[in-house]
Image: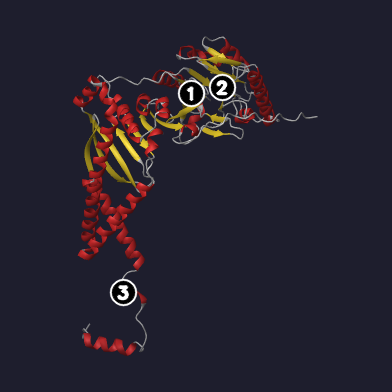
């Protein structure tokens, strides 16, 4: 085929296209600039990716903090906060700020000379808070400068590589600096120095008590932030007692520690976990709010024998999976205190009273009048609490298996414990009584494998003041289902123990119900 000259083709095109008719949109898009929104989105993507790469490469600084050598790093994050990694033991998470960057502090090693100096000269601990504050301040300033350089350099370099235009690259660097400055302002405005009072620990269960410290020390000594930093450093230092002569975790003697468990449901692994917690936290009393069994048969009774060797008194109330056969067997075990019908007992300085579940439903069926029976059982417990107070022996902790029964004690006792629902809750009811609902310490027992993921194993350490016998703080412990080597431990303070809070009033008695005809 003969080739047509280009001039002829242009002439034909001009003749065929009517005057004033625009080219096809597909042809026009090739020559026109991109949508400005798409360009802006692309620029932001380049800035964020470049800033992240810059932080990964040079955005960290090595800082000696007290007796430890640490590495501080800024990382992109949606939730912000601070993460202190103590490898290989675990990590502390602090809700220190809200910003799109998280501060990571890696404890690299414990300096033996500085650690030994603290052991040889304990008087230096009094000035440790000032030393720690200075170390953290210098490290934070150095990290801020390095991070600015890393973010701007990373965004500018990636912008130059993508756009190949200096102006675009400089624009990316400037935008990265503006975003970092905005993040810094947000972090400064939301900075919460008291977040160290309520840390969340994840890692080896055996390391948790040392790392989160003793609740009594924390709730009574939060005058200044520097003291908390010093305490945090001291607790982290104690975790390395295997390689130094520093003392191990020692709980405060003025605190009563209660381990709250519930809904074990025949999981034999629960006894090992409970024994471990009793030893690690030096627990004074164990409280079981029921459903220790699954069917309540006599054949299951041998499952309860390890309770005698757990290392602490065991207070128990009957759940809806526990039968009277189970209850009578437990009453014959050494070191076990069975509470029912509002019966009270004093153990380790605390007075407990409880009532068993009025229902026995091992097949998980709902019988007619179930709610009414729970409310009636709770009313009987509340009446017993009033009688105890009138006799001059007020109860400190009430126990019922199901929350509807526990709610009937509102105003009659400072704290009531329950279980049954297989997840943890905490609330202060209308008349001032605090209700603590425990999760399943057995991971829901054999039902743990029914779902796609095993249910977590949950328990709590409750800290009471030995003088006032009131709850000061609690640690919520959560094990990852069938994995028993790691845990998440979250410290929580009672509202009146928060810095600057006023003491909460004593629970006010609930109005007496009008008798039904």
Q: Nearer the viewer, mark 3 or mark 1?
A: 1
Look at 29% across and 59% down and name the residue there.
Answer: 175
Which of the 4 quarters of the picture holds residue 352?
A: top right
Q: Residue at x 33, y 38 (%)?
A: 83
Q: Quadrant of the C terminus?
A: top right
- The span from disc 3 to disc 2 (Cα, nearest Å) is 77 Å
Q: Position of residue 485 (x, y in %)?
A: 37, 26
Q: Mark 3 vs mark 2: give the one in front.
A: 2
Q: Which residue is mark 1?
A: 464
**Label 1's element?**
strand
SS for dot 3: loop
* Residue 194 falls left or right of residue 427: left
Residue assigned mark 3: 32
| Quadrant in which the N terminus is drawn | bottom left
In the picture, the disc for residue 396 is 2
Q: Position of residue 343 (x, y in %)?
A: 62, 16
* Mark found first going from the N terminus, 1 or 2: 2
On residue 268, which mark appears? none
Q: Give the left or right position of residue 131, taking residue 279 as reference.
A: left
Counting from the top left corner in percent of width and height, residue 118 is at 24, 23
Taking the view exactly as shown, the residue that stands out farthest to the right is: 517
Judging depth in this view, the residue of 14 and 178 nearest the camera is 178
Tag count: 3
């Amino acid at each position: 085929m003969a080739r047509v000259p280009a001039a002829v083709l242009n002439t034909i095109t001009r003749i065929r296209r009517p005057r004033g008719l625009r080219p096809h949109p597909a042809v026009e898009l090739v020559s026109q600039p991109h949508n400005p929104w798409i360009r802006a989105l692309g620029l932001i993507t380049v800035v964020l990716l470049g800033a992240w790469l810059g932080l990964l490469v040079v955005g960290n600084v090595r800082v000696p903090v007290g007796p430890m050598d640490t590495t501080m790093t800024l990382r992109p994050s949606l939730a912000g906060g601070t993460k202190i990694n103590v490898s290989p033991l675990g990590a502390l998470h602090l809700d220190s700020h809200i910003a799109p960057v998280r501060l990571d502090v890696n404890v690299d090693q414990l300096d033996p000379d500085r650690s030994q100096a603290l052991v040889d000269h304990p008087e230096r601990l009094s000035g440790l808070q000032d030393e720690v504050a200075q170390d953290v301040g210098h490290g934070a300033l150095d990290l801020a400068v390095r991070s600015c350089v890393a973010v701007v350099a990373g965004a500018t370099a990636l912008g130059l590589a993508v756009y190949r235009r200096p102006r675009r690259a400089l624009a990316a660097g400037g935008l990265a600096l503006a975003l970092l400055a905005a993040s810094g302002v947000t972090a400064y405005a939301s900075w919460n120095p008291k977040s160290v009072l309520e840390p969340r620990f994840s890692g080896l269960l055996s390391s948790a008590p040392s790392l989160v410290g003793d609740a009594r020390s924390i709730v009574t000594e939060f005058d200044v932030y520097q003291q908390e930093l010093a305490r945090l450093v001291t607790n982290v230092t104690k975790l390395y007692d295997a390689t130094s002569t520093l003392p191990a975790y020692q709980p405060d003697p003025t605190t009563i520690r209660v381990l709250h468990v519930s809904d074990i449901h025949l999981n034999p692994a629960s006894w090992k976990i409970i024994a471990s917690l009793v030893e690690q936290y030096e627990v004074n009393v164990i409280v079981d709010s029921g459903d220790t069994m699954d069917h309540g048969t006599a054949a299951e009774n041998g499952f309860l024998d390890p309770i005698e060797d757990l290392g602490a008194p065991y207070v128990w109330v009957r759940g809806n999976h526990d039968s009277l056969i189970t209850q009578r067997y437990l009453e014959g075990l050494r070191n076990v205190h069975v509470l029912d019908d509002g019966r009270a007992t004093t153990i380790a300085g605390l007075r407990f009273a409880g009532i068993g579940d009025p229902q026995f439903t091992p097949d998980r069926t709902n019988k007619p009048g179930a709610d009414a029976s729970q409310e009636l059982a709770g009313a009987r417990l509340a009446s017993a609490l009033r009688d105890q107070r009138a006799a001059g022996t007020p109860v400190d902790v009430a126990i019922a298996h199901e929350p509807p029964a526990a709610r009937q004690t509102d105003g009659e006792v400072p704290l009531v414990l329950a279980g049954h629902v297989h997840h943890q809750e905490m609330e202060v009811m209308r008349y001032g009584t605090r209700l603590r609902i425990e999760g399943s310490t057995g991971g829901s027992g054999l039902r743990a494998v029914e779902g796609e993921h095993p249910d977590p194993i949950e328990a709590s350490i409750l800290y009471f003041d030995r003088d006032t016998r009131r709850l000061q703080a609690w640690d919520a412990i959560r094990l990852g289902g069938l994995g028993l080597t790691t845990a998440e431990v979250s410290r929580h303070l009672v509202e009146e123990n928060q810095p600057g809070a006023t003491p909460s009033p004593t629970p006010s008695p609930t109005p007496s119900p009008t008798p039904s005809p």
